[in-house]
Image (cartoon, grey):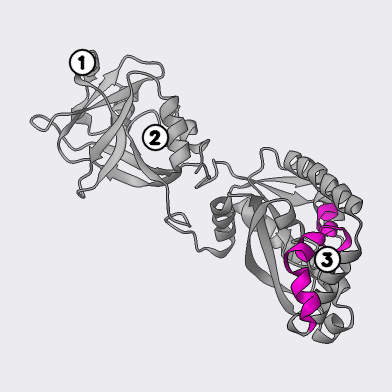
């Protein structure tokens, strides 16, 4: 799969304009703004967008003909066993039997158009931050007008499934005497991106991606954080997983490339422990990364000082012979820093 296991820095999050927050009370708006400022404090770039196309998609859930899909799935069962379904849910589904086919076709076309508009609104954006719901009605209010109240409560969520998106909801304080929450909504299969951003609001950042998966890749040079080619990893959704050291069986040479890169050579007789970084990347992402890897770089197994064997950069001895041996520096970052130090 090609899912992103992390967003590239700086992360970018969209927030609604004032019109998009119209259903909220003043207290709820203040609570929402608190979450916005919390993300800003974490260095996330914020961009205000028009929420109109998202809200239009949300309306299709209750007000359109898409409910015909539910009738096709369970309508016959509910018609034969009405007591087995919630009366409100059953009524909504059974009403779809009277919907004309042309209305469903029209609503599906509308939904496709809204998918294009919403994707364009989030182009270059990692996620959308929204209130999870509008308010907290009483049980009596819901019982009196179940469809209208539930439609209102789903103002900021009813579009998520329709637009093939994912979401992570977290608590975000109190508003009007009730709990207030926000949702981080991302494109389909960007679940980990949504989780990471939501975790910034809760202080419970995970060390490993969820769900677990992907392939570990060890890098030693230009792909390290802060170095010229690191963006090739982050663009594929790779996730930084920590610093590593090899067993004392490898040599490092500085290759005459642009940008400068090291070559890693297996040499158990005359090697040393070298520092690098571990990244986790999806299997499809690793495939694309390997397909674009220029010569003389190659991937192979690297043995770490904890006994693990992880995929990492390797260089054949013939190519490495053209480079300067820099093994004594213990790593590329240390070597590059030494080059900038003045000679006394």
Density class for disc 2 (Cα within 10 Å; few <14, some 14-19, many ≥20) is: many
Image coords of residue 304 (percent x, y) = 23, 44
- Residue drawn at the location 83% of the way across and 80% of the way down: 142
Q: Where is residue 327, by image quadrant?
A: top left
Residue 71 lies within the magenta run: yes
Q: In the drawing, does residue 118 fall left or right of residue 22?
A: left
Image coords of residue 207 (percent x, y) = 42, 56
Q: In the drawing, does residue 11 fall left or right of residue 341?
A: right
Image coords of residue 93 (percent x, y) = 82, 69
How far apart marks 3 and 2 lie (CA) works out to 44 Å
Q: Is residue 290 above or below residue 76?
A: above
Density class for disc 1 (Cα within 10 Å; few <14, some 14-19, many ≥20) is: few
Q: Which residues are magenta?
A: 55-82
| Observer able to see residue 220 | yes
Q: Is residue 95 above or below residue 9?
A: below
Residue where numbered disc 1 is placed: 318
Dot placed on the residue nearer the N-terminal end, 3 or 2: 3
User: Which element type, helix, strand or loop, lies under badge 1?
Assistant: helix
Q: Which mark is residue 24?
A: 3
Dot placed on the residue nearer the N-terminal end, 1 or 3: 3
Residue 62 lies within the magenta run: yes
Q: Is residue 135 above or below residue 212?
A: below
Which one is nearer the viewer's eye here, 140 or 124?
140
Dot placed on the residue nearer the N-terminal end, 1 or 2: 2
| Observer able to see residue 18 | no
- Residue drawn at the location 46% of the way across and 42% of the way down: 238
User: Which element type, helix, strand or loop, lies under badge 3?
Assistant: loop
Image coords of residue 4 (percent x, y) = 53, 45
Residue where numbered disc 2 is placed: 224
- Residue drawn at the location 20% of the way across and 15% of the way down: 318
The secondary structure that most of the magenta stretch takes on is helix
How far apart marks 1 and 3 lie (CA) works out to 67 Å
């Amino acid at each position: 799969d090609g899912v992103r296991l992390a967003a590239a820095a700086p992360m970018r999050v969209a927030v609604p304009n004032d019109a998009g927050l119209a259903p909220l009370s003043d207290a709820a708006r203040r609570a929402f703004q608190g979450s916005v400022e919390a993300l800003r404090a974490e260095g996330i770039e914020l961009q205000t967008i028009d929420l109109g196309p998202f809200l239009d998609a949300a309306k299709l859930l209750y007000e359109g003909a898409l409910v015909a899909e539910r009738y096709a799935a369970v309508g016959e069962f509910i018609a034969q066993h009405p007591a087995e379904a919630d009366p409100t849910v059953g009524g909504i589904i059974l009403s779809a039997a009277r919907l004309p086919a042309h209305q469903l076709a029209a609503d599906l076309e509308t939904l496709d158009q809204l998918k294009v508009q919403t994707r364009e609104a989030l182009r270059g954006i990692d996620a959308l931050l929204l209130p999870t719901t509008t308010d907290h009605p009483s049980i009596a209010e819901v019982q009196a007008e179940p469809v209208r109240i539930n439609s209102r409560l789903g103002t900021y969520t009813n579009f998520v499934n329709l637009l093939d998106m994912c979401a992570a909801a977290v608590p975000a304080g109190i508003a009007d005497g009730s709990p207030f929450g926000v949702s981080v909504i991302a494109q389909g299969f960007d679940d980990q991106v949504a989780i990471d951003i939501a975790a910034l609001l809760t202080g419970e950042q995970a060390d490993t991606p969820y769900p677990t998966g992907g392939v570990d890749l060890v890098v030693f040079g230009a792909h390290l954080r802060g170095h010229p080619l690191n963006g090739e990893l982050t663009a594929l959704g790779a996730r930084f997983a920590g610093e590593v050291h090899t067993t004392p069986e490898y040599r490092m040479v500085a290759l005459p490339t642009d940008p400068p890169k090291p070559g890693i050579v297996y040499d158990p007789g005359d090697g040393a422990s070298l520092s690098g970084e571990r990244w986790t990347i999806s299997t499809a992402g690793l495939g694309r990364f390997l397909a674009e890897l220029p010569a003389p770089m190659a991937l192979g197994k690297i043995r770490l000082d904890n006994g693990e064997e992880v995929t990492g950069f390797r260089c054949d001895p013939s190519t490495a012979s053209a480079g300067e041996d820099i093994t004594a520096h213990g790593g590329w970052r240390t070597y590059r820093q030494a080059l900038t130090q003045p000679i006394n």
